[in-house]
Amino acid sequence: MARSRYQFGEERQPHFLTATVVDWLPVFTRQETADILFSSWRYLQENQNMRLYGFVVLENHLHVVAQSNNLPATWTRFKSYTARRIIDYLQQQRIEIFLQHMRSSLKARRGDRTYQFWQEESHPQMIEGRPMLVQKLSYIHQNPVKRGYVDKPEHWRWSSARNYAGQDNLLDVFMDW
């Protein structure tokens, strides 16, 4: 098996992270599924000393710049918890088309679950200074604009661009950098 070129650098440094739903399924078109992400991030901020510098949630993936005392473990907990909660929601709502994709995407070697929610790679990139942080936050905030969903980054509700524009938002971010 080939090794991924994506690995966490220094664990306590901020990293740019991506998480993508298997088969690029548009799971985050529902407020309820996005709320699971936001409540998990809030919990991690309040209880696990996670710093969130920026984020964007699109219909099938998300990007964040985050930092914690042990970011690989924090990120693993985030992905595991949100996958379980979102799969539970999809089962309760009987959204079989998504569940069917998640069943068929499960790797044969994984005997500990029935569904695969997140693609396995997170592509962590350590932030190596302020210029890189600014570049990654700009990339995150421009994502919905480039897709043609909004004209201005702060118009996208599920983005920290609103925080940086001085607007109320669903989640606080760390901007004292």
Image (spheres, grey):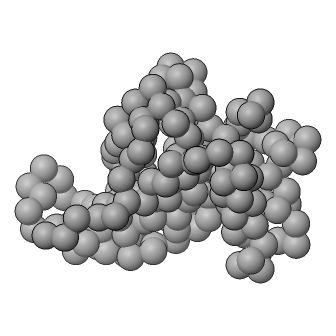
Q: Residue 68 location in percent, x, y? A: 49, 30
Give me the residue at 49% from left, 54% from top: 125
State the count of labels.
0
Give me the residue at 40% from left, 30% from top: 70
Give me the residue at 8% from left, 62% from top: 109
Say whether residue 4 is visible: yes
The single residue placed furthest to the top in the displayed view is 47
The image quadrant where one finds the C terminus is top right
Residue 90 occupies quadrant = bottom left
Q: Is residue 42 above or below residue 90?
A: above
Say whether residue 29 is visible: no
Q: Residue 176 location in percent, x, y? A: 77, 30
Q: Is residue 29 above or below residue 37?
A: below
Residue 157 occupies quadrant = bottom right
**Camera-nearest residue between 6 and 122:** 6
In the displayed structure image, the side of residue 78 where residue 57 appears, left or right: right
Q: Residue 74 location in percent, x, y? A: 41, 35
In the displayed structure image, the side of residue 20 where residue 158 appears, left or right: right
**Camera-nearest residue between 105 and 166:** 166
The image quadrant where one finds the N terminus is bottom left
In the displayed structure image, the side of residue 162 where residue 15 appears, left or right: left
Give me the residue at 22% from left, 65% from top: 3
Q: Residue 104 location in percent, x, y? A: 22, 74
